[in-house]
Every structure is written in C-alpha cells, then in structure tokens.
C-alpha cells in the first residue's frame, strides 16, 4: 500500500458535505467507476449479475450498479478499490474496460421529492420523465457535461468531470441556495 | 431547437454540436485511382438546398452518438433523425 | 382623476411611495400608474425628442409615455413602465428626461424648434464636419433626447434560470387563456399558464361584464382555485413570454421579486419553456386616433380609462368626453355613467353612431385640436358640416379599435393578415409550428367569444397530441356590440402624434413619404417610429394606415411590421441568469492545483483550465526571473510540470491500430507494444490539425494524447470516424483526460529522481529506452503509467497516476528530489523550453500550416489512407516551400516579436515580397538572447542567411539570422541519454 494520501475531487482534506435548506449535498469518494464497451464480437456480458440497462436507464444489484452511456457502452459502479477496472474486466470478458474512478467528481443530492424536482427544473433542461427514479442520463448543466442518476424520489447523483468539481459544486450550491 | 434523438427522445440542441452535410459520411477511398478529384468533390462540392437537408449532429453532451438529422432549411422542421451507425451500415 | 369606491384593490393595505420626491399613498393591487392617477398626478414624463409633457396613455405593457426610473442606488432601473410597476410599500420613482423638473423642463424649447427636428433630422443636420459627430453632436443629442439613466453601479440583485416542459403552454391568463388552461388541465395535459400581470383575469378585470350574473373577478378567482388544485397545471404570474423559438421553445421572464421592497435572493428568473403545443391568448391592445395635439396628459385610451375605473377604482374628474370610431368607446361611457361620472359627449366619427345609455352622442364629429399646457383643458370638436367648437374638457378617452396582440405569432417571420371586419391585423399563416392564437389575440375578442375560442383551440391542440379532451364549464355571458368604422387620423395642420414614445407625427410620416421612403422598413428607420422600449405597440398599425392613405394603397398592400423577440424589454441581468463571479463560466483545475497554490504559483487561464504559469521564489520581482530560473533548472537538473490538461483518449478494440492508421498521418498499427510514437493528425483538407503522442499499452489498447485546446474536438472527430467513416472497425473510445494526473519530469537528473519513487522498475536506457512506455507502480504500490517522452528536448518522462494522487505525487517528487535541485515549472518555462527545442505548438499549428512546413512531410505516409493525406499532396499545398526555421537576432540585444513578417534584406516591403512570419518568440535563458520560430520561404535552404523581421505595428525592424529550429541539442542526443 502506498502511503500517499489521495485528495478528494473538491480538494478539501475530507469529502465535502453541506446542507442548504432542505437540500443536502455530499461528495462521494467511495465509488469505483469503470467504463465498459462492447466489442464487435462480444456478447453482452452480465458483470456482477447486472443486466445491462437500455438508453436512459440504470440498474443496481447489491453494491454494484450500471448505467447506459451510449450505444453498446455502460458505466459500471462499485466500491472504490484502487483498480476497479481490473475487477470489472474479469466480469466482462472480451469487452473494452477502462478505469474511470478518478475521472469524475461524484456528488449526492438528497432532498424531499418536491424540492428535488424544483431543483432539477432550475438545473437541467430535461422533461421530468427523463429523470424518474432509476433513470440515468448525460446532459448539460451550467455549460458542463454531467451524468444524472435518479436513485430515488429523494436522491440524485450528479457526476461531472473531476477537473470541474469546484464549478459544479458552486452551481449546485448556488441553485440550492436560491431555492432555500 | 429540439433534436429528436432516436434513443433518448427530444433533446435541446444545446446538447449537440453541428457538423454539416451528411454526405461527409461517404468518404472516398484515399488509395483509389483518382482520389484527388474524389476528395475535391467530397470536401468542396456541397448542395445547399432550400428544403429538406440531411445533416450531421453530434450528441456531445449526451451519449456521443452521431446522428443524421433531416431538417427543412426553410422552416427548421425536423423530418427525421437516425444514428449514423445503424443497421445496414 | 380620483379614487372612488370598489375596484380590485386591497384598501386594507396602505402603501406609501414617492414620485419625484413627493410622498403618496396607494393600495395593494395598485400599479404605480393607477396609484399616481388616484392621487391626481397626471403628468408622468417628458417625451423623447420634444420634451412634451406626457401622461399615461394605456393600462398595460404597451405603454409608450409613462416611463420612470424605479428604485435608487445600485438598483436604479430606468425606463420602467409605470402601468405595469406593481406598487409596494416604500417604492421610489422618478420621472425621466427632464431638467430641472418634470413641471418645468428647460429642454421643452425643443418643442419650439420642432420644424428643425423632423423625420431624419439627424441624418440631414449632423453630416459634417465629420469629426464633430463623436465629440459634439452625439453627446449633445444623447443628453437632449433620451430615456432614463443607469446607476453605473454593479447590479446587486440575484437572477436565476429554469426549464419547464409542457404539453400545452398557455400565454395569457384572460378569458381565452383561462378557458384554454381549464380545458387542458381537466383533460390531464401538463399545462403551463404564463401571464404578464400579477393577477390572473386579463381584460376581464377591467370590464364590468358579468359572468353567470357575478362580477368577472369572482369567476376568475374560482377558475384560479380550480387550476391550482390540479397537479398537472403550473401557473406563472408576473411572467412574460418574450420570444418563441424553434420547435416549441419559448423564452420567458418571471419577475419574482420586482414587486417587493427587498427583491430577495432572486429578482427575476429566466424560463426556457419547451411545449408541444402553445395557445397564444395574449388579448388585444387598443389603438389611439391621431389628431392635433392628442398627446396631452388627460388624454388616454378609452379602454385604459375603463380599466382604471373598474379595476383600480380611479375615475376621471371634471368634464369627461370620449372620442371614438367604434362601439367600444361607448362601453367606456356606459361604465363611467354607471359609476356616477358624467360624460358630456361621446364624439363618434360615424354618422350612424349608436347610443347605448345616458350620455350625449355627437355623431359624425371628430376632435380637431386640444389645449392645456401640462394637462388637458379644452378640445376642439368639428362636426360633419365643418363647424368647430372649443369645449372645456379635462379627460378625453380615445377609442380607435383593438389590435390583436399577435406579436409572438410573427417571431418566425409569419406576416399578419388584414381582417376588414374588425379592421385589424390578425395572425397569418406560417407562424411558429404548434402555436395557435385564441380569443382577442386571434381577432375573436369579447369575453364570451374569447372563452369559447380558448376552449376550442386548446381542445384542438390536445387532440393533435392524441389526448382526449374533457371540456371545461364556461360561464354564461353576453358580449356587447363591437362595430367599428376605422378612423386612423384626423386631418389638420397641427401635429398629430402617432408614436408618442418616439415623437413621430402624421406630418413626419408624410415627410418621409415625400422623401421617397417607400417601404414601411424605410419609414421606421427614417422616423424612428416603432423603436425603443414599446416597439410601437400603440403606433405601428396607425402609421401603416397613414402610410397607406398617402400612397393610395390599401393597408395590407402597404405592408406590416416585422415582430422580433423580445415582446417587452428584458433586463440583461436575467439573460445572464445570475452567472457572475465564479459561476461566470466553468473552470477546470488540474490535479496539482492545490499543491501549486501552496507553492505560491501564479496562474493563467488556458481555455477553461487554470494552469500554473510560473512559481515565483523569494527575491524574484519580475516574471522573467522566475521563468528563466525554471527553464535553466530543467536543462541543468530536473523540473516538474503538470501536463494533465493534454487530452487523453483510451482506444481499444481488435482494429485499434488500423483505426489509428486512419486517424494519424503516420503509421500507428506498426507501433510495438510498450512504445510511444509522435503522431500528426490532419484535417481532411490536408492542413495540420493536431499533434501528440500515441502509446501502445497492449495489442488492442492504445492511449492517444492531444493538445490541450483540441482535446474535445479530436475526440469528436475520432467518434465521427468510428461511427460514420469506418463503422466496420472494432474500436472503442473513451476519454480519460481527467482520470490521470500527468506530470512531466524533465532534465538530466530526471532518471535519478524517478528511481527514487518507482517500485523496483528498471529505468536504464536498455530496459526503458527513449519513447518507451509501461504500466508500473510507484510510491509503494500506486498504480501508474510511465512514458519516456520529451517536450523540452532533455532526458524526460511523463508519469501518470490516478488523479486523486496527483498533488501527493508532485509533493513527494519535490521532497525526494530536493538534493537534485528539483524545480517546479509552469507554462511559461514549458513554452521557452519547447521553443528552444523547436517543437511545434498552437502558434505553429494555427490552421494554415502543413506537415511539410514543419519539416515533417515524411510523416504523411503514402502507403496507407489517412484523414487528410490525399489533399495534403495536392499541387498548391505540396509546392509550399515555407519551412519552420529558428531565428536569432544579429544584435543579441534586439527583440524578436511573434507576428512580425519576414523579408529578404533590402527587399521592398509588400505582400509580394513577404516571405513568412514569426510564430513564436521568447527570451532564451540558455542562449541569453531572444529567439524565435517562424515559417520562411525556402527556409530549409537558407541557413545562416540574414533576413529582416518587420513589425509595422511598432514600426520596428530587426535583422535576424536563420538557424536550425533546434536551438538546443540539434542532434537529439539528450533525450536518448
């Protein structure tokens, strides 16, 4: 094990967490991510028993999950273990797997369903049906590409490019504050 | 504008990047005889129709699919959209 | 005017406010205009050009006259229409465009000079001398003619944005809009109802017409309560839909806090509303009749007079008359009489004018003049037999008919069409797809007619969406008669105002016509009719009618105006939606950003990235000292630089090599596993596009790097190639730019430093030669990748580690290399090092250059097809003899400036003799002189020649010696060491 200390995407000593009115914003550093793409000859795998979802959808099975990112492409979610891609690759023979854990800032947004709905209305230009529980989609938020995963009525995960973590946090914080 | 994404439904055009004439898909073979002339036509001779136009849009802030969108250039009406990489291609 | 009983105001709410420093009292539900009128204030502004005293003309957003400055300090907002400014306790308002006061305005002398200030006077008068325009005429005109003033302080308010998606958007909450919303709401459609007023009901609130035998406001309240109970209906009051865009997208502004003394965290919100169908139920706007001196305070539209009477309980005082050409004027008379206001005459231009109640009608008569300096005193009435009489009159209501508020139907260039039966333009064909007008906006006015129409149009919209329609219960009511015989202007010698906001009269229109302004568009630009904050809402149709009369054509033949967004003025603040300060634009931070902050780095914006530019050390007072020190440290010892911003693309698949052979001009399929190759990407037209390294990690796995600027575009192009050009290849792409922190470790001691951090990895040149790459672990098991590549020309490596460890690895390398003289360097030293080495960057890959010009012509393989390869060989391009060269000043003290153009010594300076230009220049601490890179005609064959760099911008010329672009280690031994 290395003795080097990793830095959360937002750059603080510990993952950020903030309550703004009814909205709680939390930085996640425990999520492992790996992208998975089908190769021409490969049959669709079921890594960790996950049935890979179709466009706009996500699935969860115990501590693993997957969401659709494009035709023949998914992101697999699990626990951070330093080399999540290797774990996924073993589950998806013949597929192209790439480590993505460090490429993203992962933020959880928890709020009562109504407040979360209002917040989404202020943040992204998507019809509500694109973000019902279980849905996952990539879109624009404040000029940044983000992935939104609606975990439940009251919980949303926002993933953005790691280098944009500060700007994304600012956008979410600011919008939530205007709501409060 | 709204682009009717064949997999994700209507999405705001801000999520997309525009390229141009869908004829760009039909790239000549660079090793073939007369490739120079073929590339000249491919690059520089474009139709500019007043009416339905097949054009390329990239879902840059979405699923990164390239789409062929048929748009009426006189009304902006969108007559169809399909993945550039689809069955039969 | 004075306050009477009744109305839709909350008398329990006492609101104090000031206008021009005087205190007044109004009530909840008042607008600034209604409250001022209730306090007997009629004079509210001075006109734009002539500084004529003006009162309120309308009771809505079309108001041309009553423009005021609201609030004070940083919140001061000019040109606000008093007719839509909702009253709040403590409101401060000031009149505009007057000095020293509204009542005594010195610039009213302009009115006496009116013959000089006619249509087009700027263009005629201020032609010369030319220099006077900017210094004298324009400032003078701007001071004399104009609107309100800005505070010049930063806007202290907050703004917001939002996105709504609806089956049906209903614009306007009057009779038609409410019927449409109720119908769609009951049918289960997702409805957004937007109304610019703070109270739903539209024109119904201004009328005395009963619905089901009850006041209309009761029914409106019931309808609103019903709508609010529906989860599928969203009501947005105080929200103006200002523009219709393609595919059912609408722009709207919600005035969230403008009606509050403290606007709160969000003053206004910009909505982008995407609707499958839209019902435009924006109602209609009354139009005036142009007659001599028709602009005095006390003269207002008859419908506005009725609105102030019924909704705001403000009645005219003294002698009241109505001037009309239609039945609607009589309606005002009837309502006034019913509220105990005596109407001494309804002057109706129609010979067969009706009489509906207890008032005197003067048939076939017109108003031909008025008097009264700051308020109306008398009017001149001329009978059909030509006899004229001056009559005392303190309030005159003018009814010229109603124009449908069809502006939004014209936002996609649809032109309105003339409907002779109502003597007005109605929406034409070809308007925004999915949008249909209903009610008065469609020319189907009257409360009952509009309600029925709103329900019908909404039903049709839902049916078109395949939804079943549940009708709404609409109240019983009967519309009064609406006959009209249009009268546009009353001929006469004195000025008759058409556009009160821009001070345009019938005479100006006639003059413009005489001066050959044949089209309506000419008229607008010559006279300024229809410009400024009201965009001619009360003027355009009348002006067209006058123009038609002058040309002897019909109104529809004469033309229509073009309507563009925004419908009413939109503040710049709300268009920015509060994205100021850190929210102005996204900012990307590389993984070592915090470490660099702790090191005291100076940062520079590189596109969206913040990068360390240099790291000042104690005692350094000039950036050059820091940069020179950093660059020398790399050449002497070892330096560290975060190069994470370079794009990284993971390329996998059975055909990855074959695919990259198409993407790069040089071969990549032949690259061995564990090796890196420098690659060039061309545009399909043969011009150089991007460069970078390509590393092969496995048979079916490459990592491509791009320049920082092109990371996004290169990925986009590679996806295009993958999906569209070569769909049969088995290749998968994914960006990993953010996943890896990449640190350049450069300098003769770089190997020595890296040996201290790798976990038992053999770094010797035999085991890990120049252009090798490998996965490895560092610092006790941290997953990493090492590339032996060099941008500086020294022995160098790039170490990639998971991004979250970037800062920690950087800090560890600094610690481990302290005794080796390890030095962090920023983008400036990076640039110096690469110029000294002659490596191309953005300034050389500027979209005009070729591989051959960089001396890399052989990197465009002729053995395979690659993007851009064919066109790079076309004659014009292949024949280009300009080559990248190094340039050193003959006199070492001289400056070398990028952008300067190159000439043979002694040659005439002209386009024909121009032989190239300098792309990059810097001070080389290594050579202790400035150096440059540039493209020079026949450059490869001109080594040691002395040429001239001309910089006409600074008037300087420098003699330069042509040398190899590789100022440092031209043999390239150092990186292979």
Image: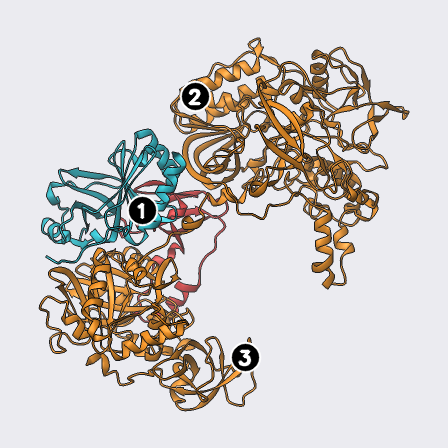
Chain colours: A cyan, B red, C orange
Are discs 2 and 1 both within one chain? no
Q: Between B6 and C80, which is closer to the camera in this rendering? A: C80
Could you say where residue C108 lies in the image, as x and y percent from the top left? Answer: 79, 42
Looking at the image, which residue is at 12% across and 44% down?
A46
For numbered disc 3, what is the local secondary structure?
Answer: loop
User: Would you say residue C526 is visible in this rendering?
Assistant: no
The image position of residue C164, as x and y in percent, is: 41, 35
Nearer the observer, disc 2 or disc 3? 2
Residue most toward the front? Answer: C619
Pick out the residue farthest to the top.
C213
Q: Quadrant of residue C295?
A: top right
Residue of label 2: C228
Q: For mark 3, does the 10 Å Cα neighbourhood hold few (<14), some (14 to 19), or many (20 or more) residues?
A: few
- Check disc 1 and report the residue beneath it: A146
- Residue that numbered label 3 is attached to: C911
Q: Please rate how many residues cluster around mark 1, counting C-alpha atoms within 10 Å: few if below 14, some from 14 to 19, many from 20.
A: many
Q: Is residue A60 above or below residue C191?
A: below
Disc 1: host chain = A
Identify which residue is drawn at 78% across, 55% down. Answer: C125
- Give the alpha-carbon distance from disc 2 to disc 3, as whole Å: 72 Å
- Secondary structure at badge 2 equals helix
> Closer to the camera: disc 1 or disc 3?
1
Same-chain status of marks 1 and 3: no
- Quadrant of the drawing holding the C terminus of chain C: bottom left
The answer for how far apart the CA atoms under marks 2 and 1 are is 34 Å
Q: Secondary structure at mark 1?
A: strand
């Amino acid at each position: 094990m290395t003795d080097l200390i990793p830095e959360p995407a937002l750059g603080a000593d510990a993952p950020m967490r903030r309550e703004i009115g009814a909205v709680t914003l939390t930085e996640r550093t425990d999520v492992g991510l790996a992208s998975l793409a089908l190769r021409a000859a490969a049959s669709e795998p079921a890594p960790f028993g996950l049935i890979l979802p179709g466009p706009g959808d996500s699935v969860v099975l115990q501590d693993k999950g997957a969401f659709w990112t494009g035709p023949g492409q998914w992101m697999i979610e699990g626990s951070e273990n330093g080399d999540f891609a290797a774990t996924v690759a073993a589950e998806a023979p013949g597929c192209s797997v790439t480590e993505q854990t460090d490429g993203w800032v992962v933020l959880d947004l928890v709020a009562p369903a109504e407040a979360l709905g209002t917040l989404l209305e202020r943040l992204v230009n998507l019809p509500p049906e694109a973000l019902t529980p279980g849905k996952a989609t990539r879109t624009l938020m404040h000029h940044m590409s983000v992935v939104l995963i609606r975990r439940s009525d009251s919980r949303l995960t926002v993933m953005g490019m790691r280098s944009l973590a500060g700007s994304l946090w600012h956008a979410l914080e600011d919008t939530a504050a205007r709501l409060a | 504008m709204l682009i009717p994404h064949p997999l994700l439904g209507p999405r705001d055009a801000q999520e997309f990047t525009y390229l141009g004439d869908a004829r760009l898909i039909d790239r000549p073979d660079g090793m073939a005889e007369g490739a120079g002339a073929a590339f000249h036509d491919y690059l520089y001779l474009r139709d500019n129709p007043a009416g339905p136009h097949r054009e390329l849009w990239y879902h840059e802030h979405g699923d990164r699919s390239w789409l062929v969108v048929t748009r009426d250039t006189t009304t902006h009406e969108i007559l169809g959209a399909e993945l550039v990489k689809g069955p039969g291609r | 005017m004075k306050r009477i009983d009744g109305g839709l105001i909350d008398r329990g709410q006492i609101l104090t406010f000031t206008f021009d420093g005087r205190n007044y009292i109004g009530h909840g539900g008042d607008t600034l205009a209604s409250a001022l009128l209730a306090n007997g204030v009629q004079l509210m502004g001075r006109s734009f050009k002539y500084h004529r005293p003006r009162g309120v003309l309308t009771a809505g957003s079309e108001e041309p006259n009553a423009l005021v400055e609201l609030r004070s300090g940083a919140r001061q907002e000019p040109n606000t229409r008093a007719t839509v400014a909702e009253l709040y306790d403590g409101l401060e308002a000031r009149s505009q465009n007057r000095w020293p006061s509204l009542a005594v305005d010195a610039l009213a002398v302009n009115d006496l000079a009116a013959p000089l200030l006619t249509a087009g006077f700027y263009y005629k008068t201020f032609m010369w001398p030319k220099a006077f325009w900017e210094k004298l005429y324009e400032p003078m005109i701007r001071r004399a003619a104009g609107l309100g003033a800005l505070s010049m302080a930063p806007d202290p308010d907050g703004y917001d944005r939002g996105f709504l998606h609806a089956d049906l958007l209903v614009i306007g909450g009057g009779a038609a809009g409410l019927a449409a919303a109720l119908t769609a709401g009951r049918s289960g459609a997702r409805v957004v109802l937007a109304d610019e007023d703070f109270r739903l009901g539209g024109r119904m609130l201004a009328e005395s017409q009963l619905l089901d035998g009850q006041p209309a406001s009761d029914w409106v309240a019931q309808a609103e309560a019903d709508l609010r109970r529906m989860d599928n209906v969203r009501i947005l009051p105080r929200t103006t839909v200002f523009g219709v865009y393609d595919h059912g997208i609408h722009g709207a502004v919600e005035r969230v806090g403008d009606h509050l003394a403290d606007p709160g965290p969000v003053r206004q919100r910009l909505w982008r509303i995407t609707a499958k169908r839209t019902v435009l139920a924006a109602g209609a706007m009354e139009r005036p009749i142009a007659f001599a001196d028709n602009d005095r305070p006390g003269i207002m539209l008859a419908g506005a007079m009725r609105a102030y009477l019924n909704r705001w309980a403000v009645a005219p005082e003294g002698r009241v008359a109505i001037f009309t050409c239609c039945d609607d004027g009589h309606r005002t008379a009837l309502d006034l009489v019913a509220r105990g206001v005596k109407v001494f005459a309804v002057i109706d231009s129609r010979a067969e004018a009706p009489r509906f109640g207890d008032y005197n009608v003067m048939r076939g008569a017109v108003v031909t003049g008025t008097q009264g300096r700051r308020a109306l005193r008398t009017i001149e009435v001329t009978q059909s037999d030509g006899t004229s009489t001056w009559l005392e009159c303190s309030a005159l209501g003018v009814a010229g008919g109603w124009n449908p508020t069809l502006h939004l139907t014209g936002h996609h260039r649809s032109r309105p069409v003339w409907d002779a039966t109502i003597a007005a333009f109605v929406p034409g064909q070809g308007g925004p797809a999915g949008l249909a007008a209903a009610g008065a906006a469609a020319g189907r006015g009257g409360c009952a007619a509009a309600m029925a129409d709103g329900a019908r149009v909404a039903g049709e919209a839902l049916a078109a969406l395949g939804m079943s329609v549940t009708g709404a219960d609409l109240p019983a009511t009967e519309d009064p008669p609406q006959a009209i015989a249009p009268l546009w202007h009353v001929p006469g010698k004195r000025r008759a105002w058409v556009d009160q906001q821009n001070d345009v009269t019938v005479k100006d229109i006639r003059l413009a016509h005489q001066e050959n302004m044949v089209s309506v568009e000419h008229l607008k630009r010559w006279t300024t009719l229809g410009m400024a904050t009201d965009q001619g809402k009360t003027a355009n149709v009348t002006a067209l009618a006058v123009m038609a009369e002058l040309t002897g054509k019909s109104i529809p033949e004469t033309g229509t105006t073009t309507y563009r967004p925004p419908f009413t003025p939109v503040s710049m603040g709300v268009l920015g939606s509060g994205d100021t300060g850190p929210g102005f634009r996204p900012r990307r931070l590389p993984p070592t950003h915090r470490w660099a902050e702790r090191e005291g780095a100076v940062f520079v914006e590189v596109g969206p990235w913040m990068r360390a530019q240099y790291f000042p050390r104690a005692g350094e007072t000039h950036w050059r000292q820091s940069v020179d020190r950093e660059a020398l440290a790399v050449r002497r010892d070892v330096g560290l630089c975060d190069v994470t911003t370079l794009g990284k693309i993971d390329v996998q698949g059975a055909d990855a090599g074959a695919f990259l052979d198409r993407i790069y001009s040089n071969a990549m399929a032949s690259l061995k596993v564990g090796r890196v190759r420098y690659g060039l990407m061309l545009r399909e037209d043969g011009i150089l596009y991007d460069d970078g390294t390509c590393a092969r990690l496995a048979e079916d796995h490459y990592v491509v790097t791009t320049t920082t600027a092109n990371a996004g575009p290169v990925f986009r192009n590679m996806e295009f190639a993958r999906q569209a050009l070569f769909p049969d290849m088995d290749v998968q792409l994914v960006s990993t730019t953010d996943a890896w922190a990449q640190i350049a470790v450069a300098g003769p001691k770089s190997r020595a430093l890296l040996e201290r951090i790798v976990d038992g990895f053999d770094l010797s040149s035999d085991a890990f030669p120049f252009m090798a790459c490998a996965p490895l672990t560092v610092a006790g098991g941290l997953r990493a990748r090492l590339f032996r590549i060099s941008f500086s020309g020294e022995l160098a490596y790039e170490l990639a580690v998971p991004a979250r460890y970037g800062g920690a690895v950087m800090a560890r390398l600094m610690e481990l290399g302290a005794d080796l003289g390890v030095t962090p360097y920023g983008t400036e030293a990076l640039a110096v090092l690469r110029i000294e080495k002659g490596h191309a960057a953005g300034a050389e890959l500027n979209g005009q250059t070729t591989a051959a010009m960089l001396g890399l012509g052989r990197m465009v393989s002729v053995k395979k097809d690659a993007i851009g390869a064919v066109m790079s060989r076309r004659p014009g391009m292949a024949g280009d003899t300009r080559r990248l060269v190094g340039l050193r000043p003959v006199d070492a003290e001289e400056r070398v400036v990028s952008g300067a153009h190159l000439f043979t010594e002694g040659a005439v300076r002209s386009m024909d003799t121009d032989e190239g230009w300098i792309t990059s220049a810097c001070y080389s601490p290594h050579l202790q002189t400035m150096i440059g890179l540039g493209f020079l005609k026949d450059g490869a064959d001109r080594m040691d020649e002395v040429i001239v760099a001309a910089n006409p911008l600074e008037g300087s010329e420098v003699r330069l010696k042509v040398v190899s672009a590789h100022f440092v280690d031209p043999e390239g031994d150092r990186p292979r060491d």
